[in-house]
Amino acid sequence: MQSNVVMAALGLGSNMGDTKSYIEAAISALSAFEGIEVVGRSSDYRTPPWGPVPQDDYRNCCVTVKTHLSPKRLLEACLGIEKQLGRVRDERWGPRTIDIDVLLYGETRVEDDVLSVPHPRMMERAFVLVPLAEIWPNALIGGGLTVAGALEKCPDKNGISKL
Ligand code: X6L
Ligand code: MG
Ligand code: MG
């Protein structure tokens, strides 16, 4: 029995359709999920698309959750909610109605075929760090670095605006 409660951080993103509704519906579904309690929610940000695929700007935000789910179960909950909200996995790194990523799971490190936590590229992504720093600036993301510290060193913060 896993009865330990862990604080985890999730990153949400949407750049297709009614992005505000997708984000809200995802957070509602997370709250309703057995074993997940949403305890913090950042502002939403409009963020330029990052990566090799030209696409529309994103709405991104982060939530903190208390959970007794394992990292893998938490990921499965996120993927199930994406699917429930109609996400179609099309082009890799392409536009999507809703994306829910596991960023942090306490100070636990996970490295397996389906999951890497802390998210290995979060420290380079201002669209993750700006909202996360709003709700959990002192979270440790490895190498003695905090979210706020990583954000200071992160390029491309300009172009991100609070909605
Ligand atoms: C070279 C190769 C350089 C790949 C960058 C970066 C790939 C980011 C994927 C990359 C590369 C990603 C979001 C986004 C995506 C989002 C914003 C990804 C996955 N998701 N841009 N781009 N917000 N603003 O949530 O993060 S695709
Ligand atoms: Mg993502
Ligand atoms: Mg994802």
Image (spheres, grey):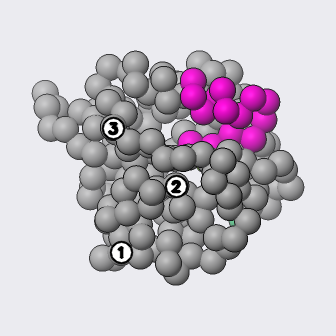
Q: Nearer the viewer, mark 2 or mark 1?
A: 2
Q: Which mark is drawn over residue 131?
A: 2
Q: Secondary structure at mark 3?
A: strand
Residue under label 3: 39
- Name the residue rendered at 50%, 72% in the picture: 151
* Spot occupied by residue 85 in the image (x, y as percentages of width and height): 63, 21
Question: Could you tell me if residue 100 is visible in this image?
Answer: yes
Tell me the distance, in whole angstroms, between the alpha carbons under discs 2 and 1: 17 Å
Of callouts 3 and 1, the N-terminal one: 3
- Pointers 2 and 3 in contact (C-beta within 8 Å): no
Residue named by callout 1: 145
Residue range in magenta is 12-25
Residue drawn where x is 50% and y is 78% of the image: 152
Q: Is residue 111 visible?
A: no
- Three-letter amino acid code at disc 3? Val
Camera-nearest residue between 51 and 134:
134
As for residue 80 lying within the magenta part, the answer is: no
- The type of residue carrying mark 1 is Leu
